[in-house]
Image: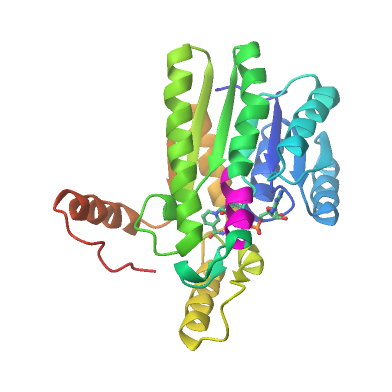
Amino acid sequence: MKELRGKVAVVTGAASGIGEALATRLAAEGMKLVLADVDEAGLERVAAALVRGGAEAAVIRCDVSSAQQVEDLAREALSAFGAVHLVCNNAGIAGTTGRMWELDAADWQRILGVNLLGAANGIRAFVPLLLRQGEGHVVNTASQAGLLPAALGDYSVTKHAVVALSEALYYDLALTGSGVGVSVLCPGWVRTNIASSRRVAGAAGPDPMREAVSDLLRARIAGGSDPAEVADRVVAGIREGRFYIVTGDDGWANALRTRVEDIVASRPPSPPSL
Ligand code: NAD
């Protein structure tokens, strides 16, 4: 999709961080915005800034882990602007502090519900609309954590799944021969509020090592890229029809090569570099 002006974008997780930056950048491109999030005060703040800048923006409270709420979002977006051209399935939360055997069913439902099913719900609710139009684009926010060895626990699990979901969607769309495209966004560390959504597993008590890991993650996020830079890369990627949009420093490419070499050589995963 090369021409964005006058078209309609839906961004989930638009009240903060990468979603807010995407909405701001897309508005600057002349798109009309549908902003969705569970944080209503944040949505109002972002929408007010966009409208002050001359954009048209609608806000819709939506928990992306609910299939029904995402279907309602699609209906309300259509009734607000009459069409949807770009869908950014971006809402996401940080992982759970705890070892793999300490996470209970509710921990898994929480993170899979938002990070994986949120994107699947968005695809089911919006892609049929885009196909009927014969034009449109989907951007699923995964992470470099979805490409590299799973050093971030349950978060890595969900992000590998979002990469796989996006690749599966790519093949399905390619077979339709339609004008609908898809990209998967895989950022490295980005300076956002995501650390505030980190949870401690129900069974996990205090543990200095886990606390040290959480502190390290918070420090990496605080020192991460500006979300506006990520949004710039996304807009360029949509125009160029890029599938993988990987942002952040270049260390990821070597880490990915090492992962593939480990798998091909039947070695266990190399130590992660966080
Ligand atoms: P953020 O916390 O600043 O923003 C996430 C937004 O999603 C928040 O406004 C939050 O209210 C919203 N949200 C959470 N649960 C929701 C739900 N159930 N339904 C609707 N909205 C919900 O974090 P961010 O870093 O901007 O995260 C955006 C995306 O980027 C996520 O998918 C995240 O996994 C991904 N990501 C972030 C980083 C990073 O370093 N910050 C790196 C790679 C990928």
Q: Is there any visible trace of residue 187 in the rendered image?
A: no
Give percent across and percent down for residue 128.
63, 19
Which residue is at the front of the view, 105 or 86?
A: 105
Vertical comparison of 194 with 44: above or below: below
Vertical comparison of 113 with 101: above or below: above
Q: Residue at x 53, y 76 (%)?
A: 214
Vertical comparison of 152 with 216: above or below: above
Colour mode of the rendering = rainbow
Give percent across and percent down for residue 253.
30, 52
Vertical comparison of 94 with 122: above or below: below
Give percent across and percent down for residue 158.
50, 51
Which residue is at the front of the view, 130 or 207?
A: 207
Residue sticking out furthest to the left:
265
Q: Is residue 173 left or right of residue 30?
A: left
Q: Residue at x 48, y 35 (%)?
A: 166
User: Does the magenta stretch mainly form a helix, a strand or a loop?
Assistant: helix
Which residue is at the front of the view, 201 or 191?
A: 201
Give percent across and percent down for residue 192.
62, 61
Q: How many marks?
A: 0
Q: Residue at x 82, y 36 (%)?
A: 57
Q: Quadrant of the C terminus?
A: bottom left
Q: Is residue 237 left or right of residue 29?
A: left
Q: Residue at x 43, y 55 (%)?
A: 145
Residue range corresponding to the magenta coloring: 107-116
Q: Quadrant of the N terminus?
A: top right
Q: Is there any visible trace of residue 61 in the rendered image?
A: yes
